Amino acid sequence: MKHGKNFTLGEYVIIKKPDLMEIGDNVRIADFCRISTACKIGNDCEIAPGTYIAGGDGKYVFEMGGFSSLAAGVKVWLSSNDYVNELVTHSVPEVKEIEGNVKLGRFTGVGTNSVIMPNNNIPEGVTIGALSFVPSNYKFEPWTVYAGRPIKPIKKRNKANILRTLMKIGYIDETCMIDGELMCAE
Ligand SMILES: CC(C)(COP(=O)(O)OP(=O)(O)OC[C@H]1O[C@@H](n2cnc3c(N)ncnc32)[C@H](O)[C@@H]1OP(=O)(O)O)[C@@H](O)C(=O)NCCC(=O)NCCS
């Protein structure tokens, strides 16, 4: 498993495919997590206790941009049985699955016990409330707060305050900003 400096790995964490894990600096993966997929985890990310990232058998990738988090008990699926059209069990070959990459942009957060289905691109600055359900292929807007089962937009994220915090900690400076937009790449 490749990881940067200041990496904290909790107790009783199961990582099924360490060769497919790339982890940045200042990352924490807390107790009781189970990760069985390929992952690219950016700097300053947190994966809180009891989180599962599963499915896809290494064929798909879970990505997390910098300064993002999955709260305790989140489940992220990169493949799922098709509960409408197919048998739903492990032993039947050649059933069609719902599958695809899941990518969280930078400054994102997923609230506790939420479920994210395969094939989702969650852009910069999005947060998702506790106990939410994110269907496959949901169309997100950046810097928006979503919640519910299934999710819907509930308000805008306080981007100005988050940018102020990022400046205060020295992650960005004025040269990154044009008309209030963050221009610096990850
Ligand atoms: C989503 C969230 C950020 C919104 O917080 P907020 O701004 O205080 O929310 P509000 O009270 O203004 O709610 C706005 C609306 O969204 C609904 N809502 C808020 N959180 C919700 C949730 N988790 N699921 C479903 N609906 C939710 C409210 O019922 C309200 O609906 P209404 O307008 O029909 O009355 C917050 O409720 C949340 O879920 N935070 C996650 C925290 C977490 O998981 N922490 C883990 C440890 S870090």
Image (cartoon, helix red, strand yellow):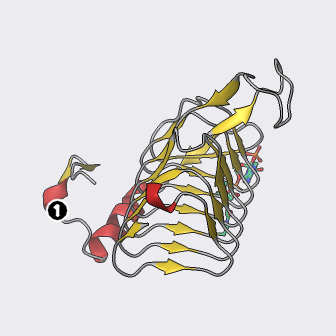
- Graded by Cα atoms within 10 Å as few (under 14), some (14 to 19) or many (20 or more), the crowding at tag 1 reads few
Q: Quadrant of residue 163?
A: bottom left
In which quadrant of the rendered image does the N terminus lie?
Answer: bottom left
Residue 160 locus on image (x, y percent): 37, 58
Q: Secondary structure at mark 1?
A: helix
Note whether residue 177 is visible. yes
Q: Name the residue: 48% across, 53% down.
A: 39
Residue 21 locus on image (x, y percent): 45, 59
Note whether residue 102 is visible. no
Instruction: Check the image and name the residue furthest to the top.
Output: 85
Nearest to the observer: residue 153 or residue 9: 9
In which quadrant of the rendered image does the C terminus lie?
Answer: bottom left
Q: Is mark 1 within 8 Å of ligand 1?
A: no
Q: Is residue 29 left or right of residue 114?
A: left
Q: Name the residue: 22% across, 46% down.
A: 179
**Height in image: 113 above or below 76?**
below
Q: Quadrant of residue 175?
A: bottom left
In the rendered structure, which amino acid carries the disc numbered 1? Glu
Q: Quadrant of residue 4?
A: bottom left
Instruction: Check the image and name the residue furthest to the left.
Output: 175
Residue 116 locus on image (x, y percent): 66, 44
Q: Name the residue: 60% across, 80% down.
A: 10
Q: Name the residue: 61% across, 54% down.
A: 36
Please name the residue that numbered disc 1 is placed on: 174
Q: Is residue 160 left or right of residue 145?
A: left
**Height in image: 56 above or below 186?**
above
* Image quadrant, ligand 1: bottom right
Q: Is residue 168 left or right of residue 96?
A: left
Residue 125 locus on image (x, y percent): 45, 51
